[in-house]
Image: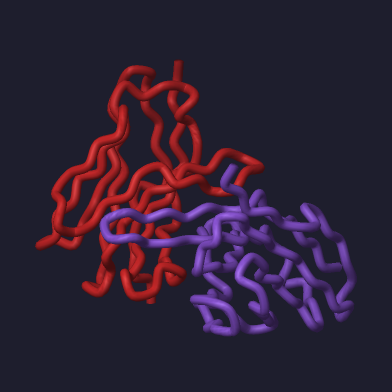
Chain colours: A red, B purple
Amino acid sequence: QQQVKQSPQSLIVQKGGISIINCAYENTAFDYFPWYQQFPGKGPALLIAIRPDVSEKKEGRFTISFNKSAKQFSLHIMDSQPGDSATYFCAATPHANAGKSTFGDGTTLTVKP
Amino acid sequence: EAQVTQNPRYLITVTGKKLTVTCSQNMNHEYMSWYRQDPGLGLRQIYYSMNVEVTDKGDVPEGYKVSRKEKRNFPLILESPSPNQTSLYFCASSVTAGVSYEQYFGPGTRLTVT
């Protein structure tokens, strides 16, 4: 049973555009909702994380929007650049057990110059 | 520099030959985890550890063992590898502190079992 569903599977955006990736979760025991960026041949790297008591968190060009009632959260990449081309994963983690993360299936983002 | 290291980075082995992939972190994190990544299946958790001598199964633990005898190390053991364990493996360490959350991944170990 997949507890975190991510969409779309792949995304193509023009340089300067906004990339939007969505995730939905089922388990209300999750307390942290991180996003990861992974380049080919590398391990995932934490981009930004949000807690459910916050509706939005911004770090540079990356913004997480969180809708607790809908159990959905999304990553927005503003002014997308070719260097942002990577695979992005959302995840959900309970506070009581920071080691037990559940990941979405990933979104492959391609930013065309 | 915060770091999670894994060794080896690449490994080709034969069915049934026991192997160990080492993982070490330098951040004094309590939590450590192992994941496998397969095309189209994302990251699936194999085992995780909440502290020394405390481990628990993740989503796909069959065929794997772990141990946590020291806080910094969390080796993954395949007692009798099979071809369906051919995958890309990642070790990670993590910590939560109030509103903050950190998780660092290692560079990965690409395992091929023939």
Rendered position, A21 above or below A93: above
Q: Is residue B47 above or below residue A32?
A: below
Residue at image coords 49%, 24%: A83
Question: Image quarter for residue A14?
Answer: top left
Determine whether, in the image, residue B88 is placed left or right of residue A51.
right
Q: Position of residue A16 (x, y in %)?
A: 33, 18
Q: Quadrant of the C terminus of chain B?
A: bottom right
Residue at image location 14% in from the left, 57% down from the top? A53
Give percent across and percent down for residue B86.
Answer: 73, 65
Looking at this view, name the residue that lies furthest to the top.
A113
| Residue beneath the point at 20% across and 45% down | A65
Front residue of B71 and B67: B71
Q: Is residue A87 left or right of residue B88?
A: left
Task: List x then y, in percent, for residue A47.
Answer: 40, 42
Instruction: Where is residue B19? Give x, y as percent.
Output: 83, 73
Q: Nearer the viewer, residue A18 or B34?
A: B34
